Image: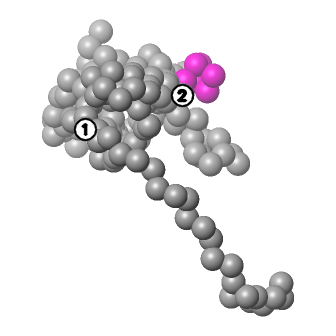
Amino acid sequence: MTEKVTNRGGHDPYAHAPAVALCPPPRCFHPVPFSNLQLCGELARWERPGNHWFETQYFCDVHRRSSDVPIPDVHLFRRVRVNVDVMFAAVHVHAPIAHTEVIARLHAAVTAYGGLLDINAVRSDVVKSSAPVVPVERNSSPGDLE
């Protein structure tokens, strides 16, 4: 059974959202008290529909309610892109071996947390480490306030 989702004004809330091919899996929205992450974040299979698309939440098997429904193939989500440089010490001096090994590790780490790796470029340099920075001692007493 397929039915068109509409908001109270009768408009399709999906109309403005582009369809994308790179779709990371939905993740669980269940709050986790006293956690640094504050939300479960495990892979979700269940949807808790709201009144509008932005109120819909997704949940894992552990945190689902009996009233939750399976997540449909076409569903809305916010896809977050983070552009960062991640550096590894290579396992081998030859670039193809080093790049392949690092990409495999990064892919495993990202997918384990529900992410999707979209590699735009890989680069590497042969470098040497520098001497560690020596901390400068300060002349202060234990009772001094900064």
**On the rendered image, what quadrant is the C terminus found in?**
bottom right
Closest to the camera, between mark 2 and mark 1, is 1
Residue type, label 2: Glu
Quadrant for residue 70, please give it. Answer: top left
The numbered mark at residue 123 is: 1
Regarding mark 1 in the picture, which secondary structure is present there? loop
**Horizontal arrangement in the rendering, residue 130 relative to residue 134 (left or right):** left
Q: Residue at x 63, y 77 (%)?
A: 136
- Say which residue appears at 25% left-offset and 38% top-offset: 123
Which residue is tagged 2? 42
Residues in magenta, as a range: 60-66
Q: Main secondary structure of the magenta part?
A: loop
State whether residue 31 is above or below residue 100: below
Location of residue 29 with respect to 42 vertically, above or below: below
Amino acid type at image mark 1: Arg
Residue drawn at x 26%, y 14% is 2
Q: CA distance from mark 2 to mark 1?
A: 31 Å
Q: Is residue 12 above or below residue 131?
A: above
- Picture coordinates of residue 63, whole percent (x, y): 61, 27
